[in-house]
Image: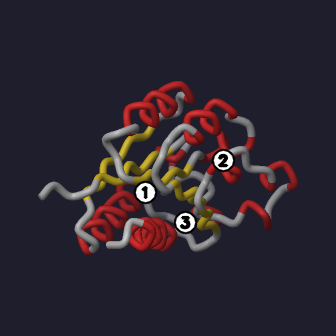
Amino acid sequence: MTAPVVLLLSGVNLDRLGTRQPEVYGTATLDDHVATARAAAEVHGLALEHFHSNAEHRLVEAIHGATGRCAAIVINPGAFTHYAWSLHDALAAFAGPIIELHLSNPAAREEWRRVSVVAPVATGTIAGFGGDGYRLAVDAVATLLGR
């Protein structure tokens, strides 16, 4: 039997992790976080696919491509969190669990970071746990999928 697929989406500027504001986001790279998520997925018998883009429309296309193919989506939209209504709309049409993920805690940061256009269509949000959030997000998906 084929393992259910979890799509991990990484948004704008996450390719700069490891060097961008390490005091906020830590020193781990995006590849490090993807490896953490992949290891957690394997524990639960899930397959993990990762896609990163700094272009909003490419993330929308990835969400569209997940429909009927992926069991769940974990998304760290980066700054798209706060204004990318196209992500909101695309995610709203996805039938499986959606976990919004953030390394830092946006609610404890600047005022403009406290609004998420993704949260209303997400099953849940994991924020403020640094790199551990990637494992927690996959664990949450596994629970929601009954794995």
Between the residue at mark 1 and the residue at mark 3, the CA separation in whole angstroms equals: 8 Å
| Residue pictured at 56% horizontal, 41% vertical | 91
**Residue, disc 1:** 29
**Marks 2 and 3 in Cβ contact (< 8 Å):** no
Q: How many marks?
A: 3
The part of the image, by quadrant, that contains residue 4 is bottom left
Q: Tell me where residue 6 appears, x and y as whole percent.
A: 35, 54
Q: Is residue 13 left or right of residue 119?
A: left
Residue type for callout 1? Thr
**Residue, disc 3:** 26
| Residue pictured at 40% horizontal, 37% vertical | 67
Q: Is residue 76 above or below residue 85?
A: below
**Residue, disc 2:** 118
Residue type for callout 2? Val
**Marks 1 and 3 in Cβ contact (< 8 Å):** no
Q: Secondary structure at mark 3?
A: loop
The quarter in which the N terminus is drawn is bottom left
Q: Is residue 24 above or below residue 31?
A: below
- The foreground one among 67 and 42 is 67
Q: Tell me where residue 56 appears, x and y as whole percent.
A: 56, 29
